[in-house]
Amino acid sequence: MKQGIQTDFPHEELRKYGCYFFCLVKWASKIMDKDFTEGEIIALFDAAMEAELVRKNALVFNPSQVLNLIIGKNIFRSTSIVKQPPNRNIYIIYLQKPGYGHFVLFDRGEIYDPLDPERPGAARYVPVSYREIF
């Protein structure tokens, strides 16, 4: 999945609010060595809504189970929110700036941003917490 996929995504809720979900899809794509199409991402989101793992507004209730749903295997059991960067190769970072929050994926030193990382508003975000999924 390309950086910035969320910016022009055809599904309204995912385009507006789906950064966490896109990070989970990107994580799953690394595990599966698979690039998901827009249609597949929308179908996965619909399946996660049906399983009550996410809301229509893309609020993610159970990230570990969303990952399991996407990869089709029961590998992950839990999610922890921590204040310091985890000692792991891959995790999700929650960023904030006044009035806004955003999620990005950290993967072995690289940052995946579902929004365009070159957008002017990206510069003022600061990390406030981290999601470990194991």
Image (cartoon, rainbow, N blue to C red):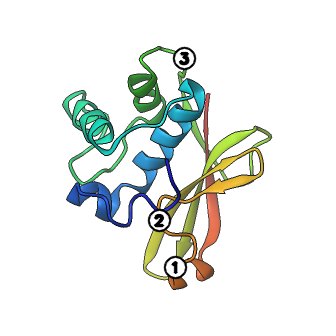
Residue 112: image location, x then y, percent: 59, 55
Q: Which residue is mark 1?
A: 119
Query: What residue is rendered at 31% in x and 61% in y?
Result: 15
Q: Which mark is residue 75?
A: 3
Q: Element type at marker 3?
A: loop
Tag 1 or tag 3, which sits nearer the N-term? 3
Label 3 with label 2: CB-CB less than 8 Å: no
Q: Marks 2 and 1, Cα distance to the nearest angstrom?
A: 8 Å
The image quadrant that residue 12 belongs to is bottom left
How many other residues sit within 10 Å of disc 1, few (<14), some (14-19) or many (≥20)? Answer: few
Query: What residue is rendered at 45% in x and 39% in y?
Result: 25
Query: What residue is rendered at 41% in x and 37% in y?
Result: 36
Q: Element type at marker 1?
A: loop
Q: Element type at marker 2?
A: loop
Between circles 3 and 1, the one closer to the viewer is: 1
Q: Which residue is mark 2?
A: 115
How many other residues sit within 10 Å of disc 2, few (<14), some (14-19) or many (≥20)? Answer: many
From the viewer's perspective, tell me whether residue 15 is left or right of residue 80.
left
Viewer-side residue, 119 vs 102: 119
Query: What residue is rendered at 36% in x and 55% in y?
Result: 18
How many other residues sit within 10 Å of disc 3, few (<14), some (14-19) or many (≥20)? Answer: few
Viewer-side residue, 51 vs 34: 34
The image shows residue 23, relative to residue 126, as above or below, that is: above
Residue 62: image location, x then y, percent: 41, 35
Amino acid type at circle 2 is Leu
Between circles 3 and 2, the one closer to the viewer is: 2
Label 2 with label 1: CB-CB less than 8 Å: yes
Q: Marks 3 and 2, Cα distance to the nearest angstrom?
A: 28 Å
The image shows residue 128, relative to residue 40, as above or below, that is: below
